[in-house]
Amino acid sequence: MREDHEIFDLVSAIEAAEGKGTTFYSWLDVPASASTAQIAKAYRKKSIQLQCVDITILNVASALLTFLANSPDKNKGVKNAHERFARLGVVSAILRKPESRKRYDFFYKNGVPKWRGTGYYYSRFRPGLGTVLVFLTLVSSVLQYQVQRLNYRRDLKRIEWIIDQARSAAWGSKMIPLDGQRKVKVNLGGGSRLDEDGNVVGGKMVDMIVEGNSVYILESDGGMITVDSNTAVAPSLKTTWFPSLVIHILGRVTKRGTPTDDGPTDNGDAGETEDGSATTSDVPGSGAVTPKEGTAPALKNGRIATTMAGGRRRKAVKKR
């Protein structure tokens, strides 16, 4: 409420000028139960004190004349006399009105809240457009980073579940490791479900290879992709939208300023070493996300999407 905001400002200003813990009543030197007449009398006395007028007996008429003759602007001997006098008038007006005094008495008894509402602070500080944009950028980037952390934890649990399913199918319920390679089919769809006609439909079945403690996705061409914790994309502030945008723009600018290289190019063999073996650069789906909870792994051209670190591909193996 606007009235509450006025009270909040006065409380802060009076404590800053008159001392910590100073209240409307203590500043006027009256009890909290003082009547309107007592408050009016205390106001006149306090106003005279602020004007540094040395008087002994003063009636209402002379007090009014003194107020007009000795305005705060003429009183340069009192520190911040104008501000204090104006503040005193507002305090007196609040305590003289029943509704506003009732609002103040509530905060007087219960204390002024530390958080006074977004509207209160916005109306006081009035942040500019630049400040608002910076604030929104920071908040959205931090929130996106938190979402990345949640997704990363979820993906790690999903990967552990896939590995456990593959090992269970290869080793049996006792989970005793066996030597050699074991080709198994793993349901990555989270179990069977019912279709629209009420028929039982199995989940996504994927061919996998278990070799020792290592687990691989078996591709249609016989290649194998490692499934481990490195497959999950770790959270990073660099991958949030604003740093990514800045890095992208800087990359474009740098690329434009770099002269082109007219040297010889390869013939598509950059993804192979001298002995002809494949490297991680020719792994289909490198850099994509990990499988989501309750669904089959993300596939691209029939192959599971992996990261550069986790998507290690092996040569084709002879299927047993």
Image (cartoon, rainbow, N blue to C red):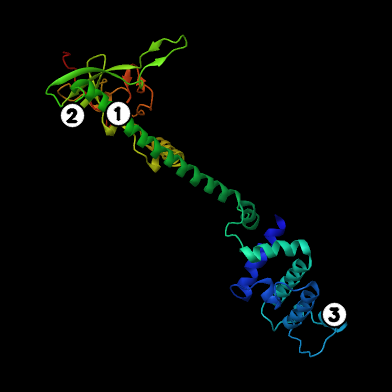
Towards the viewer: 94 or 152: 94
Q: To which residue does mark 3 refer? A: 64
Q: Closer to the observer: label 3 or label 1? A: 1
Instruction: Please name the residue shown 39% across and 12% down the image.
Output: 200
Measured from the top left, where is residue 75 in percent x and y? 74, 82
Q: To which residue does mark 2 refer? A: 213
Answer whether labels 3 and 1 touch (C-beta < 8 Å).
Answer: no
Quadrant of the rendered image containing residue 97:
bottom right
Q: Secondary structure at mark 1?
A: helix
Q: Amino acid at mark 3?
A: Leu
In the rendered view, does 2 fall on the left or right side of 185?
right
Q: Closer to the observer: label 1 or label 2? A: 1
Q: CA distance from mark 1 to mark 2?
A: 14 Å
Q: Secondary structure at mark 2?
A: loop
Circle 3 packing at 10 Å, graded few (<14), some (14-19), many (20+), is: some
The earlier-in-sequence mark between 1 and 2 is: 1
Measured from the top left, where is residue 236 in percent x and y? 37, 41
| Residue at the front extreme of this rendering | 33
In the rendered view, does 71 fall on the left or right side of 229?
right
Measured from the top left, where is residue 52 in percent x and y? 73, 85
Instruction: Please name the residue shown 78% across and 64% down the image.
Output: 98
Q: Amino acid at mark 1?
A: Trp
Q: Secondary structure at mark 3?
A: helix
Q: Is residue 264 visible?
A: no
Q: Quadrant of the C terminus?
A: top left
Quadrant of the rendered image containing residue 28:
bottom right
Q: Amino acid at mark 2?
A: Asn
In the rendered view, does 102 fall on the left or right side of 130?
right
Disc sitting over residue 161 in the figure: 1
Towards the viewer: 70 or 260: 70
Q: Quadrant of the N terminus?
A: bottom right
Measured from the top left, where is residue 123 in percent x and y? 65, 55
